[in-house]
Image (spheres, helix red, strand yellow):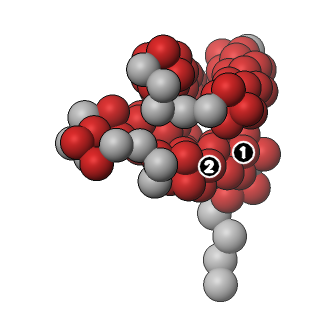
């Protein structure tokens, strides 16, 4: 089976790990949030890895960097939703801290990737 270039990116692997964490964490949310924060948080985190994957198929480095920027924006969206979830008491302090640290790691990696794409 062929391994695509995005699958080799450590930042993509970390973002998929974040998705799994978010799916686990949101199982504990109130059921009335199924179409609210749960849905938004899942979509935002899935978007990080999806845009990285899509960006690797682009021809120019400028286009690749554009999708890396979208991934970064999705990470910020997810962070905002995590903060709101914590403020509403839907997420434990420990889960919040671990997810926030993972997002910080991912965004640092995304910044480095975008910089390398723009400087090639």
Which residue corresponds to the image point at 48% horizontal and 15% vertical from the top-left? 87
Observer-nearest of 18 and 13: 18
* Badge number at residue 64: none
Is residue 46 visible to the viewer in this orientation of the structure? no
**In the rendered structure, which disc, 2 or 1, sits on the residue that comes first in sequence?**
1
Dot 2: few (<14), some (14–19), or many (≥20) neighbours within 10 Å?
some
Observer-nearest of 1 and 94: 94
Dot 1: few (<14), some (14–19), or many (≥20) neighbours within 10 Å?
some
Left or right of 56? Residue 40 is: left
Left or right of 101? Residue 36 is: left
Q: Position of residue 71 (x, y in %)?
A: 51, 29
* Badge number at residue 14: 1
Observer-nearest of 71 and 92: 92
Left or right of 36? Residue 26 is: right
Is residue 100 visible to the viewer in this orientation of the structure? yes
Q: Nearer the viewer, mark 2 or mark 1?
A: 2
Which image quarter holds the C terminus? top right
Which residue corresponds to the image point at 78% horizontal and 45% vertical from the top-left? 10
Q: Position of residue 112 (x, y in %)?
A: 77, 20
Q: Secondary structure at mark 2?
A: helix
- Real-space CA distance between mark 2 and mark 1, rounded to the nearest whole angstrom: 11 Å
Which residue corresponds to the image point at 34% horizontal and 43% vertical from the top-left? 30
Q: Compared with residue 87, is residue 17 higher up or lower down, i.e. above or below?
A: below
Which residue corresponds to the image point at 67% horizontal and 58% vertical from the top-left? 7
Q: Secondary structure at mark 1?
A: helix
Q: Position of residue 24 (x, y in %)?
A: 56, 54
Q: Position of residue 106 (x, y in %)?
A: 70, 30
* Badge number at residue 21: 2
Q: Compared with residue 63, is residue 17 higher up or lower down, i.e. above or below?
A: below
* Rendered image quadrant of residue 116: top right
């Amino acid at each position: 089976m062929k391994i695509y270039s995005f699958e080799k990116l450590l930042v993509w692997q970390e973002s998929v790990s974040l998705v799994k964490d978010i799916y686990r964490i949101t199982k504990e949310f109130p059921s009335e949030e199924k179409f609210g924060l749960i849905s938004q948080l899942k979509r935002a985190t899935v978007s990080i890895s999806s845009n990285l994957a899509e960006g690797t198929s682009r021809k120019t480095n400028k286009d690749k960097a554009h999708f890396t920027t979208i991934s970064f924006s999705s990470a910020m969206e997810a962070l905002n939703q995590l903060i709101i979830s914590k403020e509403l008491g839907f997420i434990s302090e420990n889960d919040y801290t671990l997810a926030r640290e993972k997002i910080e790691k991912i965004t640092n990696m995304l910044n480095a990737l975008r910089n390398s794409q723009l400087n090639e």
